[in-house]
């Protein structure tokens, strides 16, 4: 399969931004701006408390709603956590798992990422799994090993059939929220390493049909160049997803 046959997925990761009222306003602004852009899938991953407002504001549009995390247990004594079933019932279709901010600030490990991922898939959610190296790892030339290892550990026990609901986001940690961006060549090369790792686990057909996004200061200016790369099938966008105009330019670049 060539790149043209893979869907392109442009996903916003709002992180801890926007109240329900602001969610309604921003999505209402965005809906008419992206309504005819059918060349890519459009997803907004919003804070838990904004899900209801996001689902209502995006109803009938081509914008899908995602969450930013999910717990691995179906229910129980896990104060502060949210289950996959709860997300589904609220109209969520996607969930980000293993974002580096969760790994860095909230003790997320490959083992818990793997559990969350399997719980989300079992509940019928689509997963955006984040992997990526820190600056020291890139400087020391071990980026390929790090992303391959994360990919393998995070996907342990995930069936070939479930891979159709897994998107992988390559997010170099040093490029997140820093204004630094991987060069298109670096993004392409490391997304290619992830694709090769998936081929090793599941075979070429699944590797060729898996959507691999780039994330890390993707913005209105650099999106077209990054998205043109053969192994880059979309973007996971933080800061630039908070402005309707900037996000729309990125969606346009993906057409
Ligand atoms: P920025 O686009 O703000 O660098 O964030 C990237 C990111 O972490 C998306 O998940």
Image (cartoon, helix red, strand yellow):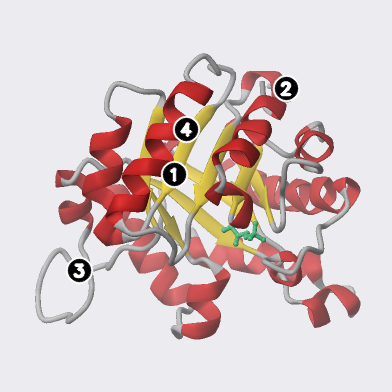
Of residues 36 and 209, the one nearer the viewer is: 36
Give me the C-alpha separation between circle 2 and circle 4: 31 Å
Q: Earlier in the sequence, mark 2 or mark 3?
A: 2
In the picture, measured across the screen, residue 151 lies left or right of residue 87, that is right
The residue labelled by disc 2 is 2
**Residue 195 image offset from top left, x and y in percent:** 69, 45
Q: Is residue 162 visible?
A: no
Of callouts 4 and 3, the N-terminal one: 4
Determine if residue 216 is in view: yes
Disc 4: which residue: 30
Q: Earlier in the sequence, mark 1 or mark 2?
A: 2
Q: Is mark 4 in CB contact (under 8 Å) with mark 1? A: no
N-terminal-most mark, 4 or 1: 4
Residue contact between numbered discs 3 and 1, judged by CB atoms under 8 Å? no
Q: Which mark is residue 73?
A: 3
Q: Percent x, y for residue 100?
A: 57, 71
- Identify the residue shown where x is 53% and y is 43%: 11
Mark positioned earlier in the residue sequence (2 or 4): 2
Q: Are marks 2 and 4 in contact (CB under 8 Å)?
A: no
Q: Distance of mark 4 from mark 3, alpha carbons?
A: 34 Å
Q: Confirm or reject: label 1 Cβ below 8 Å from ligand 1.
A: no
Which residue corresponds to mark 1? 44
């Amino acid at each position: 399969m060539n790149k043209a046959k893979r869907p392109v997925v442009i996903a916003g990761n709002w992180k801890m931004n926007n109240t329900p009222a602001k969610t309604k306003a921003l999505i209402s602004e965005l809906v008419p701006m992206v309504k005819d852009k059918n060349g890519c899938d459009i997803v907004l991953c919003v804070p838990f408390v904004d899900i209801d407002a996001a689902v209502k504001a995006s109803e009938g549009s081509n914008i899908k709603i995602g969450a930013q995390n999910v717990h691995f247990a179906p229910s129980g004594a896990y104060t502060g956590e949210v289950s996959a079933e709860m997300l589904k019932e609220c109209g969520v279709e996607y969930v980000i798992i293993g974002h580096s901010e969760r790994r860095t600030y909230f003790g997320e490990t490959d083992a818990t990422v793997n559990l969350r991922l399997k719980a989300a898939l079992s509940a019928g959610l689509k997963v955006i799994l984040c992997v990526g190296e820190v600056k020291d790892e890139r400087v020391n030339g071990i980026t390929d090993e790090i992303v391959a290892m994360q990919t393998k550990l995070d996907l342990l026990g995930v069936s070939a059939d479930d891979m159709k609901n897994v998107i992988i986001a390559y997010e170099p940690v040093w490029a997140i929220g820093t204004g630094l961006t991987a060069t298109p060549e670096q993004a392409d090369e490391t997304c290619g390493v992830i694709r090769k790792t998936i081929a090793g686990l599941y075979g070429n057909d699944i590797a060729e049909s898996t959507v691999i996004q780039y994330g890390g200061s993707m913005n209105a200016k650099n999106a077209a160049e990054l998205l043109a790369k053969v192994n880059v099938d979309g973007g996971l966008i933080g800061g630039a997803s908070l402005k309707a105009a900037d996000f729309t330019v990125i969606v346009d670049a993906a057409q």
